[in-house]
């Protein structure tokens, strides 16, 4: 099996993370890339197994149906690859005796040959499936697996790192907003009681502990009530 420059280009592009990128978009990109760039491949699937959960993408809806059926049967080439950690090749679905119930579904959807490649990434496994409408299409997946492993690992690592950055930014923004509303609540308490900023914060903390709520949530409630009483004025 020869990998093409189109496949290499498309897989490399998955590693360039842009806004809206996700693990799901990477999986979908993999299936589209192999369907376009691997000779004899009519369609592809990609399953991300992580912490007992699975995320599935496919180039064609029929392949989602086939993969779901394989999951229900608990047998088939993808299940075998997931369990063994080794590639699984089916040169002719109709002549392979290993999974007759899976084969019947595959043939109904026009699939005659299958190559399944398991790729280990950080704390997860990606099961990539290549499907042909002719027999004997997928006979050697070593070069393809090497290329996929490199590019898929990079793409998913970049997406997860991007998610971490966004999560960190969101948490920082939330912390800044919380600090701002706490300062406003302290101002309300100080204006009513004439106490210091430190005493106002101690009062907020005492009430929050008594009612078992976060200081920021209590402050937000106090500020909202103040604004409602004073026509939306900021303290």
Image: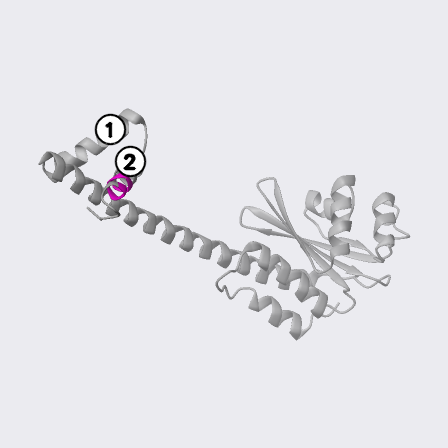
What mark, if any, has residue 155 been given in the picture? none
Q: Residue at x 87, y 53 (%)?
A: 108
Can you see residue 74? Answer: no
User: Residue 145 at what x, y percent from top left?
Assistant: 67, 60
- Relative horizontal placement of residue 164, taking residue 9 as reference (left or right): left
- As measured in the structure, the alpha-carbon distance from the residue carrying label 2 to the one carrying label 1 is 8 Å
Q: Residue at x 57, y 68 (%)?
A: 12
| Region rendered in magenta | 223-228
Label tally = 2
Magenta stretch encompasses residue 225? yes
Residue 212 highlighted magenta (yes or no): no
Q: Main secondary structure of the magenta part?
A: helix
State the quadrant of the N terminus.
bottom right
Q: Percent x, y for residue 196? A: 9, 38
- Marker disc for residue 218: 2
**Along the viewing direction, whichever of 92 and 204 lies nearer the viewer:** 204
Q: Secondary structure at mark 2?
A: helix
The answer to whether marks 2 and 1 mark residues whose Cβ atoms lie closer than 8 Å is: yes
Q: Is residue 30 above or below residue 180?
A: below
Q: Which comes before the other along the chain, label 2 or label 1?
A: 1
Residue located at (69% from left, 65% from top): 34
Q: Secondary structure at mark 1?
A: helix
Where 138 sits versus 80, above or below? below
Q: Read off the residue under disc 1.
A: 207
Q: Inspect this view and state whether residue 148 appears.
A: yes
């Amino acid at each position: 099996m020869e990998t093409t420059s189109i496949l290499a280009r498309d897989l490399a592009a998955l590693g360039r993370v842009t806004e809206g990128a996700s693990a799901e978009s990477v999986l979908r990109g993999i299936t589209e890339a192999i369907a376009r760039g691997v000779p004899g491949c009519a369609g592809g699937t990609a399953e991300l197994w992580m912490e007992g959960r699975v995320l599935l993408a496919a180039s064609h809806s029929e392949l989602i149906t086939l993969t779901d059926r394989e999951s229900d049967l608990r047998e088939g080439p993808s299940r075998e690859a997931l369990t063994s950690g080794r590639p699984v090749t089916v040169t002719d679905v109709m002549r392979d005796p290993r999974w007759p119930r899976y084969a019947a579904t595959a043939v109904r959807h026009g699939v005659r040959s299958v190559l399944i490649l398991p790729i280990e990434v950080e704390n997860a496994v990606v099961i990539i499936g290549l499907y042909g409408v002719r027999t004997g299409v997928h006979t050697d997946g070593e070069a393809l697996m090497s290329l996929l492993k490199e590019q898929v690992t990079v793409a998913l690592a970049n997406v997860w790192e991007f998610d971490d950055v966004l999560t960190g930014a969101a948490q920082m923004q939330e912390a800044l907003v919380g600090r701002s509303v706490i300062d406003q609540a302290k101002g309300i308490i100080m204006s009513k009681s004439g106490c210091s900023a430190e005493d106002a914060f101690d009062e907020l903390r005492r009430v929050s502990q008594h009612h078992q709520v976060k200081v920021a949530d209590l402050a937000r409630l106090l500020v909202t009530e103040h604004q409602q009483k004073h026509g939306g004025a900021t303290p």
